[in-house]
Image (cartoon, rainbow, N blue to C red):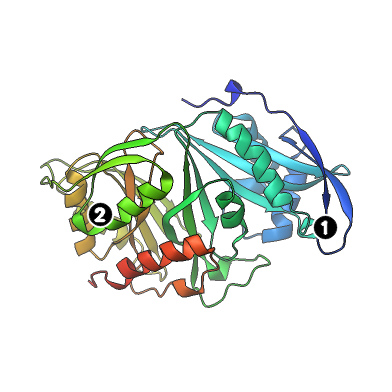
Amino acid sequence: MLLKTNIEFPELTKELCNTHTGEKRRFTMRPFAPGDEKGMIACIRDEYGDSYFKRDFYDENKLREKALGDHYVFFVAETDGEIAGMEIFALFTEQGDDFIEPASQIFRVRYRGYGLAEELVLYTFALAKQMQPLALFVHAVTFHPITQKVCGAQGMIPTGFRLGSFLAEKMQNSYPKGRCPKHSEGVMILPVQKKNAGTVYVPQVLADYMSDCYERLGMSYTLCFDRKELPQIPAKLDVTTDELQRTVLARILQSGADLGDQITQIMTLHREQPCWTYQITLSADSGYAIAEYEVLHHMGFFFTGLKAACAQTEQFYMQWCGDLDLCMEDYVLTEEFERVRKQIQQFYDERERV
C-alpha cells in the first residue's frame, strides 16, 4: 500500500522566464503546508470561478483535511509569497488498486507563459516514481493539450478516454468550449512497478487495440478470448454519481447474471435529464469480462479504452452516451491522442442503438 510517509518531499526553487514578456521570476515548488489553503482556492477561482467539479476544494477546512490525510498529497508553486499554482496526487490503494493519479494542476492565469506547468510536472513526477506505485495514471482534459503534452514528455501513454466528464454549460474557465455539449478526459498511463500485464481476457474485437496499447506501454501481455457465462449470482458494483456533471462511474467488483438489470436501474434514475453519461470499469482477469462486454454492448455501451498496470488485474472501460453528440473531432489533442481518438471514434460510431 502506498503511504505518503514513505518518502520525503523536498522543495525546489527555479528561475523561469516568461516566453511572452521576457520577465524572469523565481518559483519555489514544495509540498503543502497549513496556510496554503487560501492561495490554492484563489488559484481555483481564478481559473474556474465557481464551476470547479471538486466542490470540497472551495472549503478551507475540507481542503486542509484532505491535504493532511492519507489519500492525497498536495503540492504548490509559490512566487513572492503568493501561491501561483498547485497540483494534487490522489493515492488509490483499495480493491487491488495501487496507483498514483497526478491531478488537478491549476495555475493563476497571470503566471502562464513561464513553463510552470512543465516544471511542476518534472518536480512532482520524480517524487511519484520514488513512491513506487504500480503505475502513474492521469485524466487529461480535452479542451486544451497542455496536460497531454507535459505528461507525454514524461513517458505517459494515451490509452483511452473518459467521455462526457464535464457539462459545458457548467464550465467557467478561460478555454473555448467549442461545440461540445460535454467535454471529456483522456486517459494516460505510465507503468512504474508493473511491467507484465499477465493474461488479459477481452473479446476478439478489442484485440488489435489492446495489443497496440500494451506495445506502446512496453508491457508484456497475453490476450485470451475464452468467454465464460456470467454466474447465477448478483453482480456487485461500486457506483459514484456526479449530479452536477451528470456522470456515473461504476466498477464491477463481482460478476453476476443480473449485471444488465442493475445498470438499467441506475440509468432509469436519470432519464428525466439530458446529457447523462455512464462509464463502467471491467476487470479483465477472467472470461466473465467477455460476457460482461457483450451485455453492455447490447445495451448501447461501447469500448473507450484500457486502464493498464493500475491494479493486480488489468481493466478496461465501457461507456454509454445515448444519442449525445460528443463532437470528438473538436477535441484539442496531441498527435498521439488524436490517433487514439480516431480508434475510439470507430467504437463510438459502431455502437448499438437501443
Q: Earlier in the sequence, mark 2 or mark 1?
A: 1
Q: Decide: few, some or many residues near mark 2? Use Cα within 10 Å; few <14, some 14-19, many ≥20.
A: some
Name the residue rendered at 12%, 42% in the picture: 231
Give the camera-side residue of 79 and 272.
79
Of residues 339 and 135, the one drawn nearer to the viewer in this rendering: 339
Tag on residue 26?
none
Is residue 49 visible to the viewer in this orientation of the structure?
no
Given residues 140 and 72, the one toward you in this image is 140
x, y percentage for residue 89? Answer: 58, 39
Report which quarter residue 207 is drawn in: bottom left
As displayed, is residue 199 above or below residue 114?
above
> Mark 2 highlights which residue?
207
* Other-residue count near label 1 (Cα within 10 Å), few / some / many at <14 / 14–19 / ≥20: some
Compared to residue 218, the image places residue 134 above or below, namely: above
Decide if residue 153 is on the left or right side of residue 115.
left
- Residue 18's mark? 1
Q: Position of residue 214 (x, y in %)?
A: 36, 47
Judged from this view, the residue extending furthest toward the top is 6
**In 3D space, how far apart are the residues under numbered discs 2 and 1 (Cα atoms)?**
46 Å
What's the residue type where badge 2 is placed? Ala
Percent across and percent down for residue 238 are: 34, 43
